[in-house]
Amino acid sequence: MDFMKMMKQAKQLQEKMGSLQEAVANIETEGSSGGGMVKITIAGKGEIRSIKIDPSLLKEDEVEILEDLIIAAHNEARAKAEALMQQKTQELMGGLGLPPGMKMPF
């Protein structure tokens, strides 16, 4: 592979990485648990945007259950965000001729 072609591909990769980071910042995913009684919406980088809790879960003796449901909902939302980011990465990087399975730095 010639050096100029490699430099051109590196520049394309850098540009696509910038647009990917912008796209990731705009992604929002929702996770739920307890049959939808707890819902969490997160941004692509993991920060929580909103939490919805069914009022029936607001009982003093069930705090641990609510805490577990919040964690489960967040984990589901995070997994969805990661899958979506992976899909977008593959779409953006598809035309660069990179080796299959190459991991990106994020």
Image: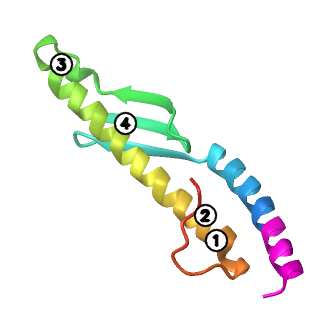
Query: Marks 4/2: CA distance?
Result: 24 Å
Majority secondary structure in the magenta region: helix
Q: Residue furthest right?
A: 4
SS of the residue under disc 3: helix
Residue 38: image x %, image y %?
A: 31, 33
Query: For mark 4, what is the residue?
Result: 39
Q: Do the residues labelled 3 and 2 touch (CB within 8 Å)?
A: no
Amino acid type shown at disc 4: Lys
* Residue at the spot of label 1: 91
Secondary structure of the residue carrying tag 4 is strand
What residue is shown at x 16% (from left), y 27% (from top)? Answer: 65
Pick out the residue farthest to the front: 3
Between 9 and 91, the one lying in front of the other is 9
Q: Name the residue under label 2.
A: 88
Q: Magenta part of the protein: which range? A: 1-12
Query: Residue drawn 86% across and 74% down?
Result: 8
- Real-space Cα distance between discs 3 and 4? 16 Å
Which is closer to the viewer, label 3 or label 1? Answer: 1
Precedes in sequence: disc 4 or disc 2? 4
Using the numbered discs, state the Cα–Cα distance from disc 3 to disc 2 in whole angstroms: 38 Å
Secondary structure of the residue carrying tag 2 is: helix
Quick one: label 3 or label 1, which is nearer the N terminus? 3
Find disc 3 in the rendering and name its residue.
63
* Viewer-nearest of discs 4 and 1: 1
- Confirm or deny contact between disc 2 and disc 1 (CB under 8 A): yes
The quarter of the picture where residue 73 lies is top left
Q: What residue type is labelled 2?
A: Lys
Distance CA(mark 4)–CA(mark 1)? 29 Å
Is residue 81 found left or right of 58 in the rendered image? right
Residue at the spot 21% in from the left edge and 32% down from the top edge: 68
Which of the numbered marks, if any, corresponds to residue 80? none
Tell me how far mark 2 sits from mark 1, CA to CA: 5 Å
